[in-house]
Image: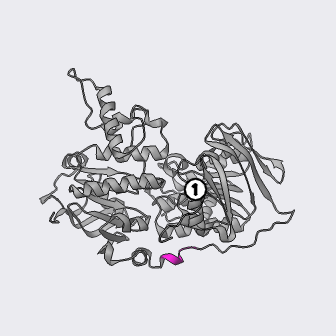
Amino acid sequence: MDSRPILQAVQICKWYPGVQALDCIDFELEEGEVHALVGQNGAGKSTLVEIIAGSIPFDTGNLIIDGSTCLNWGPAQAIEFGVQTVHQENQLVEEISVAENIFLYNLPRTKYGFVNLSHCIEKADELLGALGIDVSSDRKVSSLTFVEKKLISIAKAFSLKAKILILDEPTASLDEHGKNVLFELIRRYSKMGLSTIYISHHLKEIFEICERVTVFKDGQRVSTSRVADTDIHSIVHEMIGKSSDKLFKRSIKPLDRSAAAETLNFSHFSRDSAVKDVSFSIRAGEIYGLAGLVGSGRTELANLIFGIDRKDSGTVLLNDKDITPKSPYDAVRKGFGFLTEDRKDSGLVLVHSVKDNISLVNLVKKPLGDGFLRLGKEEDETKIVSDSLDVKTPSVHQRVINLSGGNQQKVVLGKWLFAESNIIIFDEPTVGIDVGSKSDIYKLIDRLAAEGKFIIIISSDNPELVSVCDRIGIMRFGELVKELEGTEISEEHILQYSLGVEAVQVQGL
């Protein structure tokens, strides 16, 4: 197939009040190509793809699709042409079925005009089977896990005859099988002429699936290269101006193992088959990682510890004192903090300000009978927290929805620091965050450990765990099967025990 541009963005500019989001951007996508779009949060990637999807208008320049200049371009015109987007966040309708979500724009109907639900489910089952996605199409979306929702979003995009597919962090929280299913789909459909814009902060993926890569920085296009002609260090240098192997490496310090050292013991946590009699301990100042494949029970364990889900058994002892949370409210009052996996759904109130979000949890800890808010004091204190975390915002009155992903995550962390949390659980702390912001988050976590806090990090990013953690517990099928420490900590060992094999050799690790 002869390559030809199916999409051309020519000198595209976009302004917001006080910010130029795109500065005369040129971008080209060839037919059948998988083209990576990378850059730090706030670099302009999302703005460009939202323009291509018709979600937001551009101010100047031209958008040319399949040889035609796009006038009055909007979501309906984009969908009609064949532009499909899989967003990083869930874009599904929670209270209807998987099948209805997949065919939402083209629901099969009876001759009387009613939705033919049985036919819809039948078609959805065929599609999910062909895509290798093991989810029942008659289930309500609200009952699905975060990973299952991501897979259904991908299936929804493939249900229509797409010409241009935009994938925004498509492998975030997917396990290796899910990633392989997705990559096989991309390769298969690319041969049939599908053109894909691939946005990911997992830069290694670009070298697995993409032909070209374009780097954005500060609203400008820095470069476009063939993947075969570049490397990960060059890309990172263009994104942030420093080498990827110097982003972060925690200096492991000997832990205080004396009898006087503060110790946090998690004992015999269980719930049905999701979590099976898990016990481990942490010392003050230690960063403890929880690894394992998606579905191994890591997040389920965190939910039990924080009191979100009902448990069959489990206690938390701080120096032999029982501090087991009975509920999230109780957990906050006892000094627990939980940065959840989906910060936008459960970690932040997006339409409220930085100040409101940082101070929100602290209201739980106000003494009973104290019903007054001291707004001036609250503003001063939240500004101190925001500044200490280097949140990039014009002021603490800025709405959180207008911040980049990395800065949103800092606001979530700020919320728990303001509440003086001593035990902090991070669930996928850097999902959807660029490499520069990742480095900032790692340094903040390291600082909290140095202050003597108890830190738990749940992550699907094995190199992240290796770089950051003092010890790593590995979960498999709801059980804690192995703890790694010292020289045992490596990506190979994490993978070995996560998969349940005797040994594993992974090229390139």
Quick check: 330 left or right of 141?
Answer: right
Side of 194 relative to 503 (left or right): left
Where does label 1 land, which residue?
498
The reply to whether residue 11 is visible in this rendering is yes
Residue 243, given in percent of the width and then of the height, sits at 47, 79
Give the amino acid type for the residue marked by disc 1 in the picture: Ser
Quadrant, the N terminus: bottom left
Residue 170 location, quadrant: bottom left
User: For the residue labelled by badge 1, is the local secondary structure a helix, a strand or a loop?
Assistant: helix
Above or below residue 400? Residue 60 is below
Q: Residues within 10 Å of mark 1 (few under 14, many from 20)?
A: many
Residue 170 shows in the view: no
- Residue reaching furthest top? 112
Q: Is residue 387 left or right of residue 40?
A: right
Foreground pick, 124 / 415: 124
Task: Locate residue 381: give its quadrant.
Answer: bottom right
Magenta span: 244-248
